[in-house]
């Protein structure tokens, strides 16, 4: 017989998901069968696969040991660089300022030198997270930004925080502001522009059109020009929809590609677009549970180089 004690990061999850994420060798079909046969119980009572478990519940599995091998925990994150630029943290979240050139998640080629691995290493070494005490949860990023875009990324230290953050981002209750240098002088100082974005997975590029096309998704980008000189505009963008390469492709489609953008702009061979996710605000309009204390708080990057380079005239026209 094996036993699972439900911890805080499994609180509120479905029973079947907790079991399957805990044991590598248990087939899903066998699990459902054993639940029906009452060989799997919660608090010594009959249970259902879809029921939600709560903190402190005891799941008992009266099954052969060879079907109940616990998942092997790999510590490859310990090879990640120690350098982690922390803007803010508390018991539930961590705000990190990602550097330009770093991946948020593994991409099939790079697995270790990522922001996620760096966050896991930091939380493990600071004793805020112990993989051996978790049944299923691992620290996760609530949002992501492109490799060659720097800026603020939100990390969740527990399951409840991740669940709330994901919902708040989806409902536009967390605002992310970008600072960028774009070519040309904008006709309007501020505007909200719409378009339709189509993604080409093979080329890892997107196309923006004014009208819908097959497979396209609507995008909305709000911008405000802060300054202009020497053929370059300093612009703040409020991303109202979060699609792949949205800011770069959308502004390029209206004649204002980002400085340094070799993919959507004219500077071929250069892939350090002048774009930074520099400001974040928690604009909760509905209950945020354990994260309610963040309501109304705003955080600004201390490392954003865009404004300094603009004032120094370092961007090409």
Image (cartoon, helix red, strand yellow):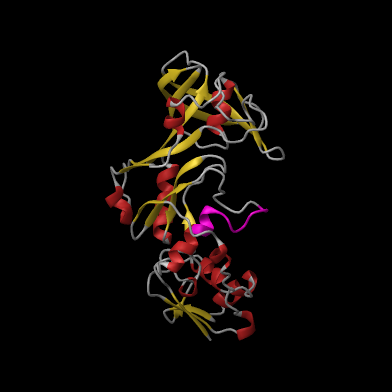
Q: Which residues are magenta?
A: 108-118
Q: Name the residue rendered at 54%, 81% in the picture.
A: 39
Q: Main secondary structure of the magenta part?
A: loop
Q: Name the residue rendered at 45%, 62% in the picture.
A: 122
Q: Nearer the viewer, residue 212 or 105?
A: 105
In the depicted structure, whether residue 122 falls above or below residue 268: below
Asked whether residue 312 appears in the rendered view, the answer is: yes
> Going by the picture, which residue comes out furthest to the right?
202
In the depicted structure, whether residue 290 falls above or below residue 192: below
> Going by the picture, which residue comes out furthest to the top?
187
Task: List x then y, in percent, for residue 175.
Answer: 39, 38
Asked which quadrant contains residue 277, the reply is top left
Task: Tell me, yes or no, whether the highlighted magenta stretch contains residue 294.
Answer: no
Task: List x then y, in percent, for residue 58.
Answer: 43, 78
Q: Is residue 297 left or right of residue 301?
A: left
In the depicted structure, whether residue 177 falls above or below residue 32: above
Task: List x then y, in percent, for residue 136.
Answer: 51, 67
Asked whether residue 175 appears in the rendered view, the answer is: no
Task: Tell me, yes or no, whether the highlighted magenta stretch contains residue 116.
Answer: yes
Q: Name the residue rendered at 53%, 39% in the picture.
A: 149
Q: Name the residue rendered at 52%, 26% in the picture.
A: 315
Task: List x then y, in percent, for residue 300.
Answer: 36, 40
**Total number of numbered discs in the rendering:** 0
């Amino acid at each position: 017989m094996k036993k699972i004690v439900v911890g805080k990061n499994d609180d509120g999850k479905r029973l079947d998901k907790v079991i399957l994420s805990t044991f590598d060798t248990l087939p899903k079909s066998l699990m459902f069968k054993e639940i029906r046969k009452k060989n799997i119980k919660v608090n010594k009572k009959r249970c259902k696969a879809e029921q939600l478990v709560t903190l402190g519940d005891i799941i008992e599995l009266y099954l052969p040991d060879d079907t109940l091998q616990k998942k092997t925990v790999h510590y490859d994150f310990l090879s990640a660089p120690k350098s982690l630029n922390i803007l803010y943290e508390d018991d539930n979240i961590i705000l990190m300022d990602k550097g330009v050139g770093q991946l948020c998640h593994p991409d099939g080629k790079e697995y270790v030198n990522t922001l996620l691995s760096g966050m896991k290493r930091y939380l493990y070494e600071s004793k805020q997270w112990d993989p051996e005490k978790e049944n299923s949860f691992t620290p996760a990023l609530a949002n992501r930004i492109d490799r060659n875009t720097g800026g603020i990324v939100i990390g969740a230290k527990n399951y409840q925080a991740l669940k709330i953050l994901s919902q708040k981002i989806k409902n536009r209750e967390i605002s992310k502001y970008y600072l960028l240098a774009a070519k040309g002088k904008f006709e309007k100082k501020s505007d909200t522009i719409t378009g339709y974005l189509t993604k080409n997975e093979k080329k890892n590029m997107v196309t923006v059109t004014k009208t819908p096309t097959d497979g396209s998704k609507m995008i909305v980008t709000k911008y405000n020009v802060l300054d202009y000189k020497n053929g370059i505009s300093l612009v703040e963008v409020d991303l109202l929809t979060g699609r792949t390469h949205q800011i770069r492709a959308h502004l390029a489609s209206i004649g204002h590609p980002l400085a340094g953008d070799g993919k959507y702009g004219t500077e071929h061979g250069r892939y350090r677009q002048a774009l930074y996710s520099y400001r974040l605000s928690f604009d909760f309009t509905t209950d945020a549970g354990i994260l309610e204390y963040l309501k109304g708080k705003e955080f600004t990057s201390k490392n954003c180089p865009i404004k300094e380079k603009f004032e120094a005239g370092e961007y090409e026209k």
